[in-house]
Amino acid sequence: MSIRVLIIDDSALVRNLLTRILEKDPQIQVVGTAADPYIAREKIKKLQPDVLTLDVEMPKMDGITFLQNLMRLHPMPVVMVSSYTEKGAEITLRALELGAIDFVSKPQGDMSSSLETIGKEIIRKVKTASRANIRAAGRARSATPLSVEEKQSVDSILPKPNKQRTNGALPLIAIGASTGGTEAIKDVLLGLPEKMPAIVITQHIPPGFSTAFAKRMDRLAALKIHEAEDAQPIIPGHVYIAPGAMHLLVSQSKQGYQCKLNDGPRVNRHKPSVDVLFRSVAQTAGRNATGVILTGMGDDGARSLLEMREAGARTIAQDEESSVVWGMPGAAIKRGAAEQVLPLEKIPSALIYLLANKGKTIHNNSSLQQRRVAASASFS
């Protein structure tokens, strides 16, 4: 059965290009297009599409206002189409907060050729959106990769050593996410106190958007949040987010840990890659690390989360019910990489409890919340 798509964009050129790109895939049928949200509203009622692609900036009613109304009255999977500008990045993050499943960015330059270059990405994200379970904020249930592109292994960036390296002296938290991850990461960070170990994060995100995401998180969270820079010292109470199109690794320094950026090939079709970050943390921090794998399509991070667990780290995977796409967490669980499987809202308290009670098992109950304030004092 084909995926029925409605394209909403004020540009006739973009509507035609997106139609041509999407209909190259036999599993997708573009059932209609709309030049503004008012036309779209009528076509949604008439055509009953499975997925919308929605331009961020349109006349008569902007995409954010339309999305807000849509999610309140008729929730359905939406893939945003945005521009590579700072303003476009901020608006897109707001759209994800409102319930959009994912986004694609309009590259700069000749629109015809540039949209064609990201055709596979557009098709993949529309397919992922079609499998979404809207109850969790857009929420899907497939761990099967939707692309047949060749996958580079994490070994191409960081080979696995013959022997486990020395454990780092300081605790370190590593988080990885993809589709739905910007909001999941926000929920985790906002649930943590200022006095925490350092946190390193890889979220699948393009350049420019990672900068806006880090700035937005820094405004909202108690922790100090940065877009990671090469050779930047990793300090307790600070969070380091991988920049778009660069792998983030953790290496040891005289003072403890530092960020290392790598411009190597994509791993598991992604750059930055969660597997790259998790492997570097396994090798650098060992049993003093905690790994968390959140919502996301595919299996990036599953392999190296297992390496973290084998190195003695504590590991957590987000559960299916609260995930936008239960690909990455599901793959990690299948590999035996996850020590604990928790709903998103319990992960902040679980992190605090684990770090304050090394060696103890998480109990998925209300006592986690009761212990939270007292436990956070351990990181003064």
Image (cartoon, rainbow, N blue to C red):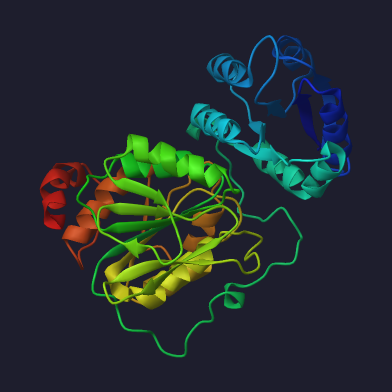
User: Residue at (71%, 9%) from the top-left corner?
Assistant: 38
Question: 280 above or below 270?
Answer: below
User: Residue at (39%, 85%) from the top-left corner?
Assistant: 164
Question: 354 above or below 374?
Answer: below
Which quadrant of the figure contains the N terminus?
A: top right
User: Residue at (62%, 36%) from the top-left corner?
Assistant: 85
Question: 110 above or below 281?
Answer: above
Which quadrant of the figure contains the C terminus?
A: bottom left
- The picture places residue 350, in percent across and down from the top left corner, at 27, 51
Q: Is residue 197 left or right of residue 22?
A: left
Quarter of the image for residue 113 reads: top right
Q: Is residue 315 left or right of residue 242?
A: left
- The picture places residue 151, in percent across and down from the top left corner, at 69, 67
Q: Is residue 249 left or right of residue 39?
A: left
Q: How many marks?
A: 0
Question: 280 above or below 118?
Answer: below
Q: Which residue is nearer to you in this view: 76 or 67?
A: 67
